[in-house]
Image: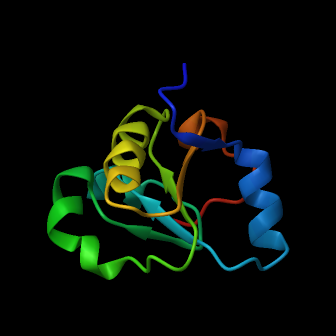
Amino acid sequence: MSHGVKEITPQELLEKLEAKEELQVIDVREVDEWNAGHIKEAKLIPLGFLPHRIDELDKNIPIVMVCRSGARSNTATEYLSAQGYDVANMVGGMLAWPGEVEQ
């Protein structure tokens, strides 16, 4: 269900990464979830830390938010959208990720 945030499918994200498009992939899960497997190009910023680490994000580069199922990343996408970032939520989260996973 969309609340007006931009969305991207896991397949679309995989294609963009494979095409070496300039993107910021931000994983908002917790450290233990990240350690169990994550997207190679992603950066970990747990959801609770996002407001404190927002200055690590570049407003000029599109951002894709990732979590386990897409719920937390949707919250993060709404938050960053409101701050003026070009941001999309990866629908389905890591449960739907078709690419390789780094451990």
Q: Is residue 34 visible?
A: yes
Point 60% across, 36% down: residue: 91
Q: Position of residue 22 (x, y in %)?
A: 67, 80
Q: Residue at x 43, y 38 (%)?
A: 74
The foreground one among 28 and 86 is: 86
Tell which of 9 and 88 is nearer to you.
Answer: 88
Q: Nearer the viewer, residue 50 or 45?
A: 50
Asked if one can make out residue 99 in the rendered structure from this viewpoint, the answer is no
Q: From this view, report whether residue 68 is shown above or below residue 85.
A: above
Q: How many discs appear?
A: 0
Quadrant of the image occupied by residue 43: bottom left
Give the side of residue 10 with respect to residue 78, left or right. Answer: right
Tell me residue 80's x, y (percent).
36, 56
Q: Quadrant of residue 31?
A: bottom left
Q: Residue at x 43, y 80 (%)?
A: 58
Q: Residue furthest top?
A: 1
Q: Is residue 94 above or below residue 50?
A: above
- In percent of the image, x 37 and y 66: which residue is there? 44
Is residue 72 left or right of 39 when viewed as pictured?
A: left
Whether residue 25 sits left or right of residue 10 in the image: it is left
> How far across and down, in percent of the image, does residue 71 sit?
41, 31
Q: Is residue 83 above or below residue 18?
A: above
Q: Position of residue 89 (x, y in %)?
A: 54, 45
**Quadrant where the N terminus is found in the figure:** top right
In this picture the colour scheme is rainbow
Q: In the drawing, does residue 11 fall left or right of residue 37?
A: right
Residue 13 image-quadrant placement: bottom right
Vertical placement of residue 66 versus 2, above or below: below
